[in-house]
Amino acid sequence: MKLFFKKILVFVFPLFLLVVGMGFYLRNMNSLYKEKLSGIIEHANEIEILILGNSHASYGVNPNYFTDYAFNIAHPGQSIYFDKELTLQNLESLKRLKYVFISLDYHSLYFSSQRGERNIWSYYGHGIKHPSEDYNKADISPFLLGYYPRVSFSFLRKDLLAKWKFRNHAQYLDFNTEVGVIKTDVLVKGFVSFSGTNTSDFKNNYYQERMNGHDYLINNSTEEEMVLNELDELITKLHSKGITAIFFSTPTFKDYNKILEPDIITHNNLVIEELCKIYNMEFWDYSVKNDFIKEEFFNPDHLNKKGAERFSKMLNSRLKLYNN
Amino acid sequence: MLFNSIEFAIFLPIVFVLYWFVTNKNLKLQNLLLLFASYFFYGWWDWRFLSLIVFSSTIDYIVGLKLSSTTNESKRKILLLTSIFINIGFLGFFKYFNFFSESFAQAFTLLGQPFEASRLNIILPIGISFYTFQTLSYSIDVYRRKMAPTKDIIAFFSFVSFFPQLVAGPIERATNLLPQFYKKRNFDYLNAVDGLKQILWGLFKKVVIADNCAIIVNDIFINYASYSGSTLILGAIFFAFQIYGDFSGYSDIAIGTARLFGFNLMQNFAFPYFSRDIAEFWRRWHISLSTWFRDYLYIPLGGSRGSTNKKIRNIFIIFIVSGFWHGANWTFIIWGALNALYFIPLLLLNRNRTNLNIAAEGKVLPTIKETINILFTFGLTVFAWIFFRADNVTHALSFIKHLFINFYIEIPNISGIGKWHIFITCILILIFTAIEWMGREGKYAIEKYSRKWNRGQRWGFYYLILLAILIYCKNQQEFIYFQF
């Protein structure tokens, strides 16, 4: 028995080291979540405009083109719940905040809990918990039960590769980013962007695939009411502080728009119209009615750096008019 | 509690330590620990269904004692029938009520008498088919005077609910497992190490092979209408590996876990995909169920004795009942019938016992004839698996129709699943098959595989397996056989 335990311990020891080592790495790893959060805290006294939303807003709105000090706290896959929690978490310190842009896309009204592992990632990055998620396991080991080994190894691999690739660059985005993001840019006001156009994504089967994903989510959603309550809580709180909330949507490519489900669009419009009435708000909808060309998109529903520049300038101009 | 979960990874070492260090001096206490651990293991899923196991165990315990206290044959028969009626009654209610209700309604409707099926919202208790058959084997064997009934209630209850094999087998015979609860178990280092190796290999089969295949298979079977025939064939082949990896992986983990506690369970899979004919396949696939049906159904029916018609009837009965055991769906019945059709020519030509040893025994590679036979048998099995995997008969037939009418060869392009994932899964299956082939003369693939290696090579090999398990552990899926 002693021999058995001894050998088990010897065998398990390297694994133990791996789990502890990876856990340490993951807990201390930089991420877009951490970067954006530290940005808000650092510039809390300057921020006048806050951009919320998922990847569409995250890559599509460049705060640097706003006249007032804007900050983008949208994240890929971020739901209204996390928009709300992240805003409310920092609201007291944002003394100069005047406007909050809330991104409402084709699928935004249908998910409160974030898909995939994003609930856990948001928790690691922002400390925000979604009520539907069990975070006990994620607390025990980010390597085994949080990010899981496959993603953890992928983070480490990408991190090491980036360190090697950009070793001669004074600055680069030293955190994990989606494929296509310009790594050599500097993160300013929470904005990172896609470079160029991924032409292979501008095909019918790709559009269909993305739509299938969205339609599956929407048709099986049980969270619409929850999302509306979350919006209510957010907007009510903002209004009580004298902050103006504006709904908006980012442009999507014209061919892609053709396959959007008309019933869902009609439903979305009705709900948003109702919300605008209730809260006396505006909806700046650029999703379908826009003149953006392929070269301004990274893929059919995400603007690239060039597209984000034009769109952000448009938002800024409209905001000026709105103020007047 | 799933074997491939963090809960089990915590549960197992705790029970192991308590078993060998705290209760090791007292056999009764050790059995009691196993009983509590088994109930905890099962109750983790849904504690309410523990009452079913307790009730079933109580009935068979009492029936066993009563059987030994009477010599009156008609009384003994009534006692046995009571056990069968109650056990099969539970199984029938939880598993087959809705099926029979709907099938009767459909039949009446077809006969022009529209009939509303009454459907109950019943949750199927996991493992009910397994422990029902296990406990039935006890009553039948006591009735047949093959074994003496036990008076040790703790040993008996532990035998029925023994956690390593409670929910998905192997379905142990009382004559093999129950006596092991009477004897003091001694810790055997080699047996325990071998048990750990078998658990490791079982986890590899489940987490790396089965769960990876499942992602692709699920999509192909749902969206079959939009894929080419070659992709559908790939889906069916992947399912063959999924179900093998899933179920034999579970069996390996169960057997390995039992060995850690000093128990020996029967081998449940013996490299079935290397079979050279269907008869051999059925001697190597889900052995504990096949032999159960052989001993308690096929032989009492007359087995392979009697007229040709009787032989054919018996084969059909055993395969159809075996199919129906898997689930309340016509797909399983067709799957069973299809296997009977594969089997009957071998029986009639008296060739059903030609391949008793493993393929290419003592050799590295099979002969051309063996290779052709293995591939042919595998092809037949894969075809039958389509029915097993399909949601209903219409789904299966439509899948097969699309396979033929839409046949062209393409690189699979499955939505949401990258080509790279499919390619990697193919590579993993090839590596897995190669390891299984090289280890086919053992009880599980890596049993003798690494004996000639030094410790560094051995451990390196185990670390590689462990790394693969770690990398793929996120795709956690339930074991398919839990639902049976």
Image (spheres, grey):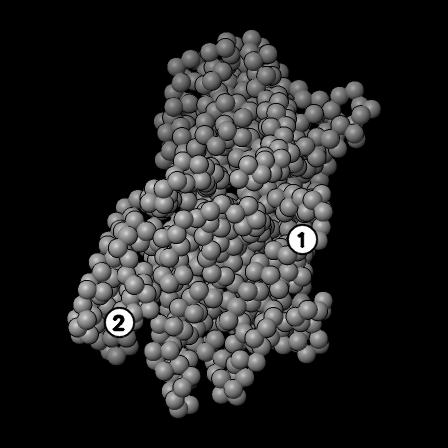
Specify the amino acid type for callout 2: Phe
Q: Which residue is mark 1?
A: B451
Q: Closer to us: mark 1 or mark 2?
A: 1
Tell which of B210 and B70 is nearer to you: B70
Tell me the tag on residue B104: 2
Q: Please state the horizontal and vertical placement of residue B322, each as a whole percent of the image.
A: 40, 70
Q: Residue at x 17, y 73 (%)?
A: B72
Secondary element under disc 1, as helix, strand or loop, is: loop
Category of crowding for the residue at label 1, using alpha-carbon neighbours closer than 10 angstroms: few (below 14), some (14–19), many (at least 20): few
Q: Is residue B116 visible?
A: no
- For disc 2, the chain is B
Callout 2: few (<14), some (14-19), or many (20+) C-alpha neighbours within 10 Å? some
> Which residue is pictured at 26% across the width and 66% down the height?
B84
Location of residue B446 by image quarter: bottom right
Kindly identify which numbered label has been placed on residue B211. Answer: none
| Residue A281: quadrant of the picture | top left
The picture places residue A205, in percent across and down from the top left corner, at 61, 53
Q: In terms of depth relative to the viewer, which is nearer, A215 or B169?
A: B169
Left-right relation of A165 to B170: right
Quick check: marks 1 and 2 in contact, CB under 8 Å? no
Real-space CA distance between mark 1 and mark 2, rounded to the nearest whole angstrom: 57 Å
